[in-house]
Image (spheres, rainbow, N blue to C red):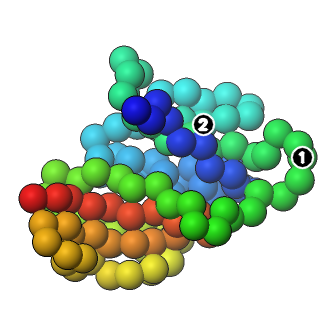
């Protein structure tokens, strides 16, 4: 099982604003925040997402084919997360809609270009 996913950023303040808004809709806030790393999720455990400048000091870049999927409670929340993402500097990679039998998703990128989606199955 995934414990957490870390994404690179070149601007933690801008990225933090984006993830504060998206994660608030998912019912979680910052569980770790220091000079190097910010993480959102449940402090008691469960999957989380982290944001940091790369350790090697080089600029953060987007991994081709890498995507983080955020589980939503229903189709309305998928749409709302998508709207929140775009309102906070994200860009569209595919509007909300059905993507096959029982799978509903919206795709977007954060301000650094990392690809995410919000989805619900069933």
Comparing 45 with 122, the one in front is 122
91 vs 45: above or below: below
Q: What residue is disc 2 on?
A: 38
Residue density around tag 1, few if under 14, some if 14–19, many if 20 or more, within 10 Å: few
Q: Secondary structure at mark 1?
A: loop
Q: Is residue 54 visible?
A: yes
User: Residue 87 in the image: x percent, y percent?
Assistant: 42, 72
69 vs 39: above or below: below
User: Residue 30 in the image: x percent, y percent?
Assistant: 47, 34
User: Residue 91 in the image: x percent, y percent?
Assistant: 50, 77
9 vs 50: above or below: below
User: Residue 29 in the image: x percent, y percent?
Assistant: 40, 37
**Quarter of the rendering occupied by the C terminus:** bottom left
What residue occupies the far front of the structure in this picture? 101
What residue occupies the far top of the structure in this picture? 44
56 vs 76: above or below: above
Q: What residue is disc 1 on?
A: 57
Residue at image location 74% in from the left, 63% down from the top: 61
Residue at image location 44% in from the left, 35% down from the top: 2
Label annotation for residue 113: none
Comparing 12 with 58, the one in front is 58
Q: Secondary structure at mark 2?
A: strand
Along the horizontal axis of the image, is 14 left or right of 49? right
Between discs 1 and 2, the one toward the N terminus = 2
Along the horizontal axis of the image, is 35 left or right of 106? right
Residue at image location 32% in from the left, 81% down from the top: 95
Along the horizontal axis of the image, is 20 left or right of 33? left
Residue 112 image-quadrant placement: bottom right
Residue density around tag 2, few if under 14, some if 14–19, many if 20 or more, within 10 Å: some
Q: Is residue 84 visible?
A: no
Comparing 89 with 64, the one in front is 64
């Amino acid at each position: 099982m995934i414990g957490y996913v870390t994404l690179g950023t070149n601007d933690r303040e801008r990225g933090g604003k984006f993830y504060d808004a998206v994660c608030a809709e998912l019912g979680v806030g910052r569980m770790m925040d220091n000079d190097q790393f910010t993480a959102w999720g449940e402090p008691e455990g469960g999957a989380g997402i982290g944001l940091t400048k790369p350790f090697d000091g080089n600029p953060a870049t987007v991994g081709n084919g890498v995507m983080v999927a955020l589980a939503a409670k229903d189709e309305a929340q998928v749409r709302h997360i998508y709207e929140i993402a775009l309102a906070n500097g994200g860009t569209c990679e595919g509007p909300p809609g059905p993507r096959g039998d029982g799978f509903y998703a919206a795709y977007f990128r954060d301000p650094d270009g990392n690809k995410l989606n919000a989805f619900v199955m069933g």
